[in-house]
């Protein structure tokens, strides 16, 4: 009953945002070339294509995914409202001889998103992104030891699945952006995971330090949730972006992470690492 009540209010809120954006639109654009609201740089659940190598470990992550705005509605005061879709995979691999990379675990995400953005004076804007998504996690054949005919590290597959809604309001001024995130899991396995997740973070691409289309960047994301106990995830990134600072391009990124493992099959495992990666952003 409690879950049904939450879902009722969530549906009302999302439908209100969608119809208010459509009814006030002066221009409609289908499948625009860019995203209305750009991904938050250090937030893990964002669209990107890239690879990350962990320092000192035989462990790497391959991300393949994209978000696409399906329709964009422009208001007479410059406001932008968009509806889109998300499809991501996050894959954990390890390296072996002869250029082999067995796949240990993979997480799938797909869902819908909506974004609303209001331009302010100068180079400032306020916006909010909502998403309705599903994530499931799975071990793959690279986690199975054929010689001993058992799962590696005696860690058997478990059912990991979550369906959730999230709201990410943000404020951008010039080269920097700050944001908050609130996520509600209206269905989750394992059931010991609590439904609420709180986030906050920032990203900045200082134009005063740029040269040509190359921008240095700094970003940070803090996430608090409950798995077996309340815990915090910290993700800090620095690097260079080749292309548009808040748009498409290529990033060389160095990441420092501390918290619970990002892969669902390892959801309760503590993880600290430094990684070097290259990503293509949309």
Image (cartoon, rainbow, N blue to C red):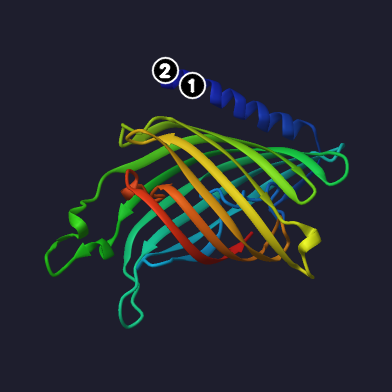
Instruction: Tell me the CA gap for discs 1 and 2.
Output: 6 Å
Left or right: 175 in relation to 70: right
| Residue that appears at 54% across and 35% down | 166
Q: What element carries label 1?
A: helix
| Residue that appears at 49% across and 66% down | 51
Left or right: 90 in relation to 33: left
Q: Residues within 10 Å of mark 2 (few under 14, many from 20)?
A: few
> Depth check: 154 or 142 in front?
154
Q: Is residue 175 visible?
A: yes
Q: Can residue 117 be seen in this view?
A: no
Q: Quadrant of residue 160?
A: top left
Q: Is mark 2 on a helix, strand or loop?
A: helix
> Depth check: 139 or 268 in front?
268
Q: Residues within 10 Å of mark 1 (few under 14, many from 20)?
A: few
Relative image position of residue 101 (x, y in whole percent):
35, 72
Left or right: 1 in relation to 178: left
- Label drawn at residue 126: none
| Residue that appears at 62% across and 61% down | 281
Q: In which quarter of the image is residue 230?
A: top left
| Residue that appears at 51% across and 66% down | 276
Left or right: 126 in relation to 10: right
Relative image position of residue 64 (x, y in whole percent):
49, 61
- In this rendering, the answer to whether 151 lies above or below 195 is below
Residue under numbered circle 1: 6
Residue under numbered circle 2: 2
Relative image position of residue 141 (x, y in whole percent):
26, 63
- In this rendering, the answer to whether 233 lies above or below 185 is below
Relative image position of residue 263 (x, y in whole percent):
38, 51
The quarter of the picture where the N terminus appears is top left
The quarter of the picture where the C terminus appears is bottom right
Label 1 close to label 2 by CB (< 8 Å): yes
């Amino acid at each position: 009953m409690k879950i049904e009540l939450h879902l009722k209010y969530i549906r009302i809120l999302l439908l209100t945002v969608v119809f208010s954006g459509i009814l006030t639109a002066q221009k409609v654009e289908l499948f625009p070339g860019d995203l209305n609201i750009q991904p938050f740089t250090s937030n893990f659940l964002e669209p990107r294509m890239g690879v990350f190598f962990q320092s000192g470990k035989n462990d790497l992550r391959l991300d393949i995914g994209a978000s696409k705005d399906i329709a964009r509605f422009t208001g007479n005061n410059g406001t932008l409202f968009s509806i889109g879709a998300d499809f991501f995979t996050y894959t954990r691999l390890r390296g072996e001889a002869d250029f082999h990379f067995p796949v240990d675990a993979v997480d799938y995400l797909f869902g819908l998103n909506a974004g609303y953005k209001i331009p302010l004076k100068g180079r400032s804007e306020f916006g909010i992104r909502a998403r309705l998504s599903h994530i499931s996690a799975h071990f793959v054949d690279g986690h199975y030891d054929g010689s001993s005919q058992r799962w590696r590290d005696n860690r058997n597959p478990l059912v990991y699945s979550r369906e959730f809604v999230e709201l990410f309001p943000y404020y951008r001024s010039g080269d920097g952006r700050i944001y908050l995130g609130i996520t509600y899991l209206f269905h989750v396995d394992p059931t010991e995971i609590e439904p609420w997740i709180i986030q906050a973070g920032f990203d900045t691409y200082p134009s005063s330090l740029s040269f040509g289309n190359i921008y240095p960047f700094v970003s940070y994301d803090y996430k608090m949730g409950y798995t077996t106990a309340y815990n915090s995830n910290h993700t800090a990134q620095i690097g260079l972006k080749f292309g548009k600072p808040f748009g498409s391009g290529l990033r060389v990124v160095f990441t420092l992470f501390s918290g619970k493992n990002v892969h669902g099959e390892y959801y309760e495992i503590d993880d600290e690492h430094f990684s070097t990666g290259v990503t293509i952003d949309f």
